[in-house]
Image: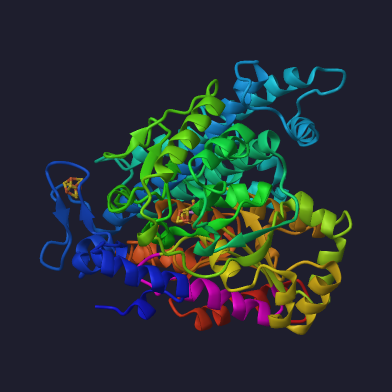
Amino acid sequence: TKTVEEMSIWEDAHQMLRKAERDGIETAWDRLEQQTPHCKFGESGVCCRICTMGPCRISKKAPLGVCGADADVIVARNFGRFLAGGAAGHSDHGRDCIEAFHAVAHGKTKDYHIQDSKKMLRIAEELGIATENRELLDVAKDLADKFFDSFGSKHEEVCFINRVPEKQQENWKNLGIMPRGVDREITEMMHRTHMGCDNDASNTMLQAARMCLGDGWAGSMIATEVSDILFGTPSPRKAQVNLGVLKKDQVNILVHGHNPIVSEKILEAVNEQELIDLAKTKGAKGINLAGLCCTGNELMMRQGIPMAGNHLMTELAIITGAVEIIVVDYQCIMPSLVQVGNCYHTKMITTADKAKFTGAEHVKFEMHNGMEQARKVVRMAIERYGMRNQDRVEIPGEPVDIMTGFSNEALLDALGGSLTPLIDAIKAGKIRGVVGIVGCNNPKYKHDYCNVNLTRELIKKDILVIVTGCVTTAAGKAGLLVPESIEQAGPGLREICGSLGIPPVIHMGSCVDNARILQLAALLANEIGVAISDLPLAASSPEWYSEKAATIGTYAVASGIYTHLGHPPNITGSPIVTNLALSGLDDLVGACFGIEPDPFKAAELINERIKAKRKGLGLEE
Ligand code: NFS
Ligand code: SF4
């Protein structure tokens, strides 16, 4: 059994883990222990359940499945389907955003609006839609259709491939990995991995790359761009993180999941005077909204709403005993939250028909009723305030300040309107490279130990770090998301960020917002006139757990960005797939994966890569 100090690096987590024990509540850490040791066949990817001649598992004694498939084929198929789950998650979220945008364009909702018309027009023009002398909503109709087109049976590439440096576009065409429709690639992945189709591991992995590129450059990128159009493009602002953002004397509502379509409406409702007054009549001082995971990132980026915690803090947030309602949409929501909630007065509200949880209450959010449903949820929270047992409430820690809101638009603004200062700093070696640290928590690791230490090590080496998703909260709690943290950076990075007044660790949003990092990489490459794979960039997901994180890693690599992972996906049973991931892809797309659980060694690994790329560009290491 691990001690609480071994489970997480955070004091607020320790305190809640102790409370969990006192209150008799099981957490992910307890269940991980029950599940350990994990099945070795599953872990190495050599268990096949694709047909009922099996299930088959590959060993020395039985090297082939009933159909004759070997370990390489089985691993490739399993991993292809794993990545398809991730691509489907981001991309279906993107589609939901387009549906909202489409409803706005066609006047079918009063609850959503175009908030950044400038950005909308800019993107319409970028994608070849006429804008001059046209009604805004007419342009929006065309743009929504254009986005929908990228999901279906397209013959040519999805939208936003236009952002990819030409040299790379050529390479993708030659390799046959230029993504066509987002859905098409996911479906083809499922087809190819049906029994008796693609029985060549490398070929299956190429399709995986194509599918993931479709996610990165279209599914996720559309999610981000449409969210900016509907809810505003983020700009720098202050916010706070950790469980200390919950309030003992207020109604606490947590939003958890991914799509701002739900959380933005909850935010609006929480700010309505009538509901605040209602809360006061029930004895609360007000209504407090805080975020979890990626929808928390979305609200924080655009609205400065505080973040209660990342993935492994979601159960612990409820254990404070101070949460009336947790509103969720989809993805990364542990079903255990319903049970933990039942130990207190906390109710889970589900909002999407595609993500119901037994034991939760369903309040379906649709385009035409978002506001009405949001008010309903807030009223339910106010009602539940009276059911709270204040004697069981324990809110640990003081909130930590952070700076958020660095969309590419905001970053460009901070740089004075062009990328030149950043490129000059890179050339001069003051900023030696840029690394995106993204993704999740995983109870197999000491919570946030790798996320935080890798970030610290890289900024020491004058490497600018961009964070998204659950790493944001980690970096924020460590005090790294404020301009003052330049003290922890190397001299060059300290000088540049200091003069710009920005932190050396920049928050760019949620996991779909990793598309912002892709776009930044492309902007830099195009400006310098090279491929993304020539730049001193890297990505990392030290504590990843989800299919989506693996998909992000794969589109990063396929886009030419070296990607570090704390642990390998379930592919180690196949020499072909493993070698392809760890080196073979380098020859094909100019990047590969690196695996290293230790954050200090990982920093070295990433640093070596950055040195090599700098040398390749003729720059000092
Ligand atoms: Ni990304 Fe966001 Fe967090 Fe991981 Fe889950 S919330 S989509 S998958 S756990 S970063
Ligand atoms: Fe076994 Fe082949 Fe069926 Fe997989 S596809 S379960 S390896 S027979």
Residue 337 position within the rendered picture, expressed as x and y whole percent measured from the top left: 33, 51
Q: Is residue 39 left or right of residue 396?
A: left
* Residue 619 seen: no
| Badge count | 0
**Coloured how?**
rainbow
The reply to whether the magenta stretch includes residue 62 is no
Location of residue 192 by image quarter: top left
Which residue occupies 19% across, 66% down? Answer: 34
Which residue occupies 38% across, 33% down? Answer: 354
Q: Is residue 87 left or right of residue 557?
A: left
From this view, report whether residue 291 is shown above or below residue 376.
Answer: below
Location of residue 527 by image quarter: bottom right
Is the C terminus in the top left, top right, bottom left or bottom right quadrant?
bottom right
Query: 579 or 598, which lies in front?
Result: 598
Residue 146 position within the rendered picture, expressed as x and y whole percent measured from the top left: 64, 26
From this view, report whether residue 184 is shown above or below residue 258.
Answer: above
User: Which residues are drawn in magenta?
Assistant: 442-463
Residue 286 position within the rendered picture, expressed as x and y whole percent measured from the top left: 57, 46
* Residue 309 seen: yes
The reply to whether the magenta stretch includes residue 453 is yes
Query: 141 or 5, which lies in front?
Result: 5
Is the N terminus in the top left, top right, bottom left or bottom right quadrant?
bottom left
From this view, report whether residue 120 is shown above or below residue 75.
Answer: above
Which residue occupies 54% across, 24% down? Answer: 367
Query: 417 or 558, which lies in front?
Result: 417
Which residue occupies 31% across, 66% down? Answer: 20
Residue 196 position within the rendered picture, expressed as x and y whole percent measured from the top left: 25, 40
